[in-house]
Amino acid sequence: MGCFTFIKVLMILFNAIIFLAGGVLLGVGIWVSVDGGSFTKVIGPISSVAVQFVNVGYFCIAIGAILVILGFLGCCGAQRESKCLLLLFFSIILVIFIAEVAAAVVALVYTSLAESVLRAWVTPTLKTDYGKQKDITTIWNTTMLELKCCGFTNYTDFTDSYYTQHNNGNYPPFCCNTTSSTCTGNDAAESKVQGCYVQLVDIIQKNAAIVGGIAAGICALELAAMVVSMYIYCKLDKS
């Protein structure tokens, strides 16, 4: 088996795994969208700490669809030796890689900007969907209970929200340290319970090595995929 054939087979196998992983993510995304409560129970309360910051169902569906497309392009491009499919595969991964690097730079250099973006994204969800959407309410309740936090920033995220409007102006019990069955605005202000964003950042910092290792591994795989696809493309161009 020549070098070109060996790399071609590896390209096919690698992208077949990507295709299958994308299919699994699509299934998970549909599962979460239909029944988010059972998903939270399966992955555990601590593991669900980050899922409230995005609509995890739609997120998994989007990522799964991208992986399925990439796996299909990579497999077909290598199998059929199609320069067009290989170039398209390379271009998509390059765009994803650039977007990831840009996001990492923003998160590291402009942490306040990243926080502002997240706040602008999450706070409206708390105000309009918490207490109304079952899956969102379950995920936030689990997170606030386990991490002893309240809202994204603090209790003010629930001010004039759907929850307070339908609970006689009371806040979620996680926002108060009192033994009372109700949590008024004054109780929440006096309790000074931290927001979940602070807790999330603390968890990420404590597991920085793991997070960094995973990110580096993903980037390495993307670079390897681009190199291999371009190698096959150049070989086909010469033949």
Image (spheres, rainbow, N blue to C red):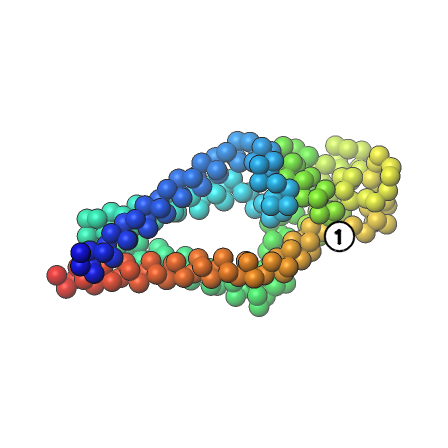
On the question of residue 132 being in view, the answer is yes
Graded by Cα atoms within 10 Å as few (under 14), some (14 to 19) or many (20 or more), the crowding at tag 1 reads some
Estimate the x, y position of residue 137 in percent, counting from the top left.
66, 36
Q: Secondary structure at mark 1?
A: loop
Residue 182 located left or right of residue 154 = right
| Position of 106 relative to 92 (above/below) | below
Is 211 or 89 nearer to us in this picture?
211
Q: Position of residue 104 (x, y in %)?
A: 52, 62
* Residue under the image location 24 percent in, 52 percent down: 9
The number of numbered discs placed on residues in the rendered structure image is 1
Residue at horizontal 32%, vertical 45%? Answer: 16
Is any part of residue 83 visible from this angle? no
Lateral position of residue 141 relative to residue 18, left or right: right
Residue 41, x across and y down, in percent: 61, 35
Q: Nearer the viewer, residue 62 or 157?
A: 62
Label 1 is placed on what type of residue? Answer: Gln
> Farthest front residue?
1
Quadrant position of residue 3: bottom left
* Residue under pointer 1: 194
Residue 21 horizontal side relative to residue 172, left or right:
left
In the picture, the quarter occupied by the N terminus is bottom left
Question: What residue lies at 60% left-to-right and 44% top-to-bottom?
Answer: 48
- Direction from residue 87 to residue 184 in the image, left or right: right
Q: Residue furthest left?
A: 239
- Residue drawn at 24 percent across, 62 percent down: 231
Q: Quadrant of the C terminus?
A: bottom left
Please state the horizontal and vertical placement of residue 219, each as a whole percent of the image. 43, 60
